[in-house]
Amino acid sequence: MPDADGRISLSYSTLDLELRAAGLGTLDDFDRAEIGEGAWAGTVDLARLREFRASWHLQWIRAGRGAAGLFVARHRTHAGAAAAQALQDEADRRRKGETLAETTPEV
């Protein structure tokens, strides 16, 4: 429903879920969204939005928030995917080293 100023709010995840429920795929299957009949209210460049969201996600990963492996799984073609994979590999090596140190008896 529109707010007092006549604005509406669109949720990316809600739109994606509704497309899935209707058997129409996901927002990843579309390049743009048209707002209003005949796009009279504008369009959203979904490819550009996905790139923005991926770049934003990578900033959080580089700040130590979130899982780099999930970034790689979700954004395989992003320019930062290799850097995120390197972060994930380093985290895996640290975790394995900690596990090894915890389970290795002292001599």
Image: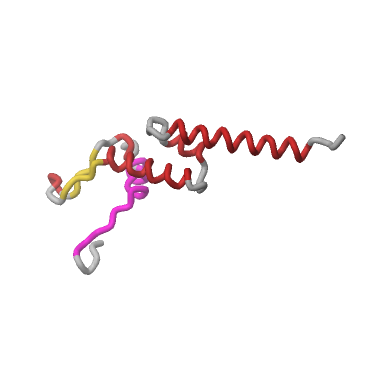
Residue 47, image x and y in percent?
28, 37
Q: How is the image coloured?
A: secondary structure
At 67% across and 35% down in the image, what residue appears?
A: 96
Asked if one can make out residue 23 in the rendered structure from this viewpoint, the answer is no
Residue 84, image x and y in percent?
48, 36
- Picture quarter with the N terminus: bottom left
Which span of residues is magenta-colored? Answer: 6-21
Asked if one can make out residue 67 in the rendered structure from this viewpoint, the answer is yes
Magenta span main SS: helix
91 lies left or right of 106: left
At 29% across and 53% down in the image, what residue appears?
A: 10
Residue 75, image x and y in percent?
41, 35
Q: Give the image quarter of residue 74.
A: top left
24 lies left or right of 96: left
Q: Give the image quarter of residue 80.
A: top left
Of residues 95 and 9, the one nearer the viewer is 95
At 49% across and 38% down in the image, what residue appears?
A: 70
Q: Is residue 2 magenta?
A: no
Residue at the far right in the pictured view = 107
- Picture quarter with the C terminus: top right
Number of marks drawn: 0
At 37% across and 42% down in the image, what residue appears?
A: 55
Residue at the far bottom in the pictured view = 4
Residue 92, image x and y in percent?
61, 35
77 lies left or right of 1: right
Q: Is residue 11 magenta?
A: yes
